[in-house]
Amino acid sequence: MNVLGFESSCDETGVALVATRAGGPPRLLAEALHTQAAMHEAYGGVVPELASRDHIRRVLPLARQVLAQAGLGVADVDLVAYTRGPGLAGALLVGAGVAVALAAALDVPALGVHHLEGHLLSPFLAASEGGEGGEAPAFPFVALLVSGGHTQLMRVDGVGRYELLGETIDDAAGEAFDKSAKLLGLGYPGGPALSRLAEFGDDGAFALPRPLLHSGDLDFSFAGLKTAVLTAQRKLGPNVCEQAKADLAASTQAAIVDVLVAKSLRALKATGLKQLVVAGGVGANRRLRERLDAGAARLGARVTYPPPALCTDNGAMIALAAALRVQAGLDAGTRAGAFDVRPRWPLDELSSAAASVLS
């Protein structure tokens, strides 16, 4: 089965072709990705209308590029997958519209995929391609979903079987990275820039809070940390030296990482599981990976990461998730007809649907 996947939930247009073969893991045949970061930089964040328009411009050329790279024609596509949600409504509609129209023209199924499920399952594709983390994770495992829009801890018992253990009660970790970087004048997207600057700073220079670190639960909060960074930045004044900026960047990164690591290890202890999967853009952060690896090793646990290219939004994870759901008998796809998107879509709804199918 050849699955063509479209990702358009925010500011990346991703298209990929994943193949499944009997007796073997899913295999990535080709992928293409366009990021809108340069376009949104002038605004310091994603402008939804501009994002939607750019998806329209990019999606078909990227699809042609992927098919050409794979050496296949459009008639070789057996299933078309797209991100149904969550995400920006207009951006989601672009990918959904193209996918459903293409599926109708080819008379093949079209399948809407949950964006976070794509992230959760991406390490399975990375392992099949010889990516980081080596072999694919085995169910069950704990997953840390950490990005600009989401910070959640999930128990994953199988494809479509997810239990929410904890989530942010306000802002996501990735947003805390990006907004703190903006305060330091580092541009957009700020997370990677802040992490690079932090390499030259003293992470103990500023006493920043670690919200909910000792709350006893698995929830997160980063709004108060952003306020603390703003207060520290204002105290430094307009003529701050580069070393002070690096120190504040390092202290900010350390505060975020401390909370993410502590909660992730607590989730492993609470569930008794010995495997942690990290997914989402913040999962590419080197300091986070070092701390998680060290902490998990002390618990006798293993951490699996997608390679950095699969941490950010991409079409490969959408095609993979669709293929695995079909293999698990959870979705047979839908033929041509009406489609909808889910800008807000709780992941645990998938578990309820899976339970009804498997019962």
Image (cartoon, helix red, strand yellow):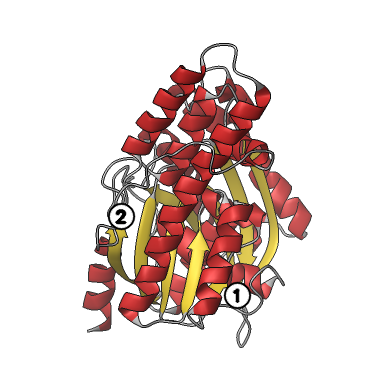
Q: Nearer the viewer, residue 132 or 173?
A: 173
Q: What percent of the width, then of the height, locates residue 48?
A: 43, 27
Name the residue tied to disc 2.
Answer: 167
* Picture residue at 60% right of the left edge, 23% below the top: 39
Give the amino acid type for the residue marked by disc 1 in the picture: Thr
The tag on residue 252 is: none
Circle 1 residues within 10 Å: few <14, some 14–19, many ≥20? some
Position of 197 compared to 250: left or right?
right
Q: Is residue 324 above or below residue 201?
A: below
Circle 2 residues within 10 Å: few <14, some 14–19, many ≥20? many
Q: Quadrant of residue 162?
A: bottom left
Position of 142 compared to 313: left or right?
left
Give the amino acid type for the residue marked by disc 2 in the picture: Glu
Q: Is residue 242 above or below residue 125?
A: above
Position of 89 compared to 26: left or right?
left
Q: What percent of the width, then of the height, locates residue 154?
A: 35, 66
Q: Residue furthest bottom?
A: 23
Q: Nearer the viewer, residue 55 or 247?
A: 247
Q: Nearer the viewer, residue 103 or 7?
A: 7
Q: What percent of the width, then of the height, locates residue 174?
A: 47, 43
The quarter in which the N terminus is drawn is bottom right
Q: Is residue 59 above or below residue 317?
A: above
Mark nearer the viewer, 1 or 2: 2
Q: Is residue 227 above or below residue 356?
A: above
Name the residue tied to disc 1.
Answer: 20
Q: What percent of the width, then of the height, locates residue 118?
A: 47, 60
* Picture residue at 51% right of the left edge, 63% below the top: 278
* Picture residue at 39% right of the left edge, 59% below the top: 335
The residue tagged with tag 2: helix, strand or loop?
strand
Q: Residue furthest top?
A: 238
